[in-house]
Image (cartoon, rainbow, N blue to C red):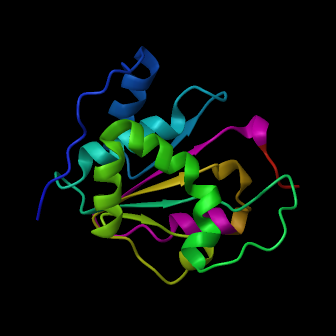
Amino acid sequence: MAKYKVPKVTIPLCVEQIAAKELVITKPVSFLTGKPGTGKTWLACHIALSLLNVDKDKIIITRPTVGTEDNGFIPGDINEKLDPWMVPIRDNIRKLVGTETLQKLESDSKLQLVSLQHFRGRTFENSVCIVDEFQNLKCKQLAMVIGRLGVNSMMILCGDSRQIDVT
């Protein structure tokens, strides 16, 4: 099976991102927090892609489907319903590896976008799990998400406590 490597990127890591990456790689569960635009999700995607097929078999990504506006009923299957919430993740991965590799990662199930509702009952082994916008998780959801971590897996939770959309 083809290996997916992160190509050299033109966006250099800042000192804080380098330090965060070094810490994240050594821990099973890490929190990346910071102001909007500091590159939390981008860094999590960079870390996950750099570990893919080196130490991990797949990347699992979720984020709460919390909105501040009522968009009404979204038609389609689960993937079509999740798509609006996964756009930021896809954008970051596309910046790192390009559209073609992103599509290949998804079609080969190396990159899986999973709703929180479908986390329950699963155990992710040999995986990097990215939980984006974790500040919008309820305590029970956070415990459930962390409980999905299996053998040789790690979880990166990205968020900003100043952007909580749930009450």
Name which residue lies at 54% across and 54% down.
131
Query: Is 17 drawn above or below residue 140 in the view shown?
Result: above
Find the residue positioned furthest to the left. Answer: 1
Q: Quadrant of residue 149?
A: bottom left
Q: Quadrant of residue 138?
A: bottom right
The answer to whether 9 is drawn above or below residue 118 in the figure is above
Q: Quadrant of the C terminus?
A: bottom right
The residues colored magenta run: 141-163
> Which residue ends up furthest to the bottom in the rendered image?
121
Q: Is residue 99 magenta?
A: no
Q: Residue at horizontal 79%, vertical 56%?
A: 67
Query: Quarter holding the N terminus?
Result: bottom left
Is residue 157 shown to the viewer in this render? no
Residue 114 in sight in this render: yes
Q: Is residue 74 above or below residue 153?
A: below
Residue 21 % position (x, y): 37, 33
The percent coordinates of residue 159 (x first, y second) are: 63, 42
Residue 53 vs 26, above or below: the answer is below
User: What is the quadrant of residue 118 in the picture?
Assistant: bottom right
Q: Residue at x 18, y 55 (%)?
A: 53
Between residue 89 and residue 17, name the one nearer to us: 89
Residue at the top extreme of this rendering: 15
